[in-house]
């Protein structure tokens, strides 16, 4: 691929991993962010301004791109005038392939915003591949970090549900595999999980061993968790989606270990233990 891959959300966990994986494989990348001056990218990566709340930035960012990697920023709840409008521009500009990072179950769950993006993409006429990763290992450094750092606990409405955590570094590698031969993956939807499903008491035990201090898992109700997340400053729509996804763990929505990631990469996915070990400083006490 000689035209660059436009990577939406290049400053985030998933987008950043995609930029690194593509760059490692010698694929030209155009990293997009609301403020590209704040991006930290590998040498030689082009940067561009793309604000999903400002449609005037869509066409200049997309023009000349050979492929588009799309991810929904957690703060974006209204996908029609944002992600779906960007897809319309991508179709007008003749983008050759779109890889959308959705979530597990979004093809069936109409509550999550990803479902509407998937539906729009499939009807757009654009060649596409949809990735449906499960719960990210990086949630420990994002959605769960404040509770781990301040209170040495993981507070979730997941009961005894389990999740096969996937590392975004592996998701980035899958995107690189897909875009190395887009035709082979056209119209495919891939569920991506880690190699083992873990309960959150097991996650707390991993953190305890790696951090050298006790970390506990505290199950809670959906309503209490929603209030807790709102007090942490997350927007209401984001807090609702986060609550719905974690409550779904009670029904086993993320417990299945899928072999697709290992098949695509030709190696096992990274374990949660590997992720925590590699990033121990993230949870150092303030």
Image (spheres, rainbow, N blue to C red):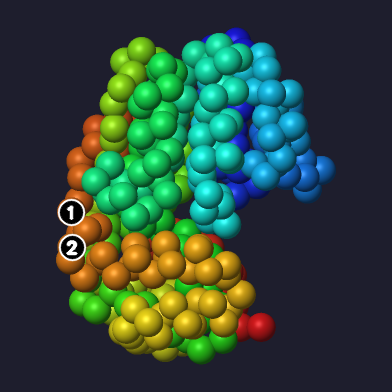
Mark yes or no: residue 169 visible: yes
Q: Are dots 2 and 1 in contact, CB under 8 Å?
A: yes
Total numbered badges shown on the rendered structure: 2
Mark yes or no: residue 174 visible: no
Residue depth check, mark 2 versus mark 1: number of the one nearer the observer: 2
Query: Around disc 1, counting alpha carbons within 10 Å, would you say few (fewer than 14), some (14 to 19), or many (20 or more)?
Result: some
User: Between 67 and 214, which is closer to the camera in this rendering?
Assistant: 67
Relative vertical location of residue 245 with respect to residue 263 in this rendering, above or below: below
Q: Which image quadrant is residue 204 in?
A: bottom left
* Local secondary structure at mark 2: loop
Q: Position of residue 96 (x, y in %)?
A: 50, 14
Q: Residue at x 54, y 25 (%)?
A: 88
User: Between 147 and 278, which is closer to the camera in this rendering?
Assistant: 147
Q: Position of residue 7 (x, y in %)?
A: 59, 33
Q: Residue at x 25, y 66 (%)?
A: 249
Q: Which image quadrant is residue 37 in?
A: top right
User: Between 98 and 200, which is closer to the camera in this rendering?
Assistant: 98
Taking 251 as reference, is 134 left or right? right
Q: Quadrant of the N terminus?
A: top right
Relative vertical location of residue 224 with respect to residue 41 in this rendering, above or below: below
* Local secondary structure at mark 1: loop
Distance CA(mark 2)–CA(mark 1): 8 Å
Q: Residue at x 44, y 35 (%)?
A: 100
Q: Position of residue 259 (x, y in %)?
A: 20, 41
Disc number placed over residue 252 in the picture, else none = 2
Query: Around disc 2, counting alpha carbons within 10 Å, would you say few (fewer than 14), some (14 to 19), or many (20 or more)?
Result: some
* Residue designated by label 1: 256
Q: Quadrant of the C terminus?
A: bottom right
Q: Position of residue 54 (x, y in %)?
A: 71, 40
């Amino acid at each position: 691929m000689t035209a660059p891959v436009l990577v939406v959300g290049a400053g985030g966990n998933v987008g950043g991993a995609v930029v690194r994986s593509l760059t490692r494989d010698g694929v030209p990348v155009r990293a997009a962010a609301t403020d590209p001056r704040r991006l930290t990218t590998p040498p030689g990566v082009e940067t561009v301004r793309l604000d999903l709340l400002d449609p005037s930035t869509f066409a200049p960012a997309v023009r000349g791109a050979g492929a588009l990697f799309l991810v929904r920023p957690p703060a974006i709840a209204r996908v029609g005038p944002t992600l779906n409008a960007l897809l319309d521009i991508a179709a007008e500009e003749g983008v050759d392939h779109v890889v959308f990072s959705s979530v597990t179950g979004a093809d069936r769950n109409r509550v999550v915003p990803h479902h509407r993006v998937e539906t729009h993409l499939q009807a757009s006429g654009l060649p596409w591949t949809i990735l449906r990763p499960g719960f990210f290992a990086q949630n420990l450094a994002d959605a769960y970090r404040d509770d781990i750092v301040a209170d040495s606990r993981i507070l979730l409405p997941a009961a005894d549900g389990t999740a096969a955590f996937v590392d975004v570094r592996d998701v980035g590698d899958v995107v690189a595999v897909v875009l190395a031969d887009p035709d082979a993956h056209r119209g495919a939807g891939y569920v991506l999980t880690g190699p083992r499903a873990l309960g959150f008491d097991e996650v707390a035990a991993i953190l305890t061993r790696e951090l050298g201090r006790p970390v506990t898992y505290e199950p809670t109700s959906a309503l209490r968790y929603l209030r807790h997340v709102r007090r942490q400053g997350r927007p209401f729509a984001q807090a609702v989606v986060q609550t719905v996804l974690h409550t779904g763990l009670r029904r086993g929505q993320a417990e299945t270990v899928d072999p697709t990631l290992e098949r695509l990469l030709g190696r096992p996915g990274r374990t949660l233990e590997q992720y925590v070990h590699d990033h121990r400083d993230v949870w150092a006490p303030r």
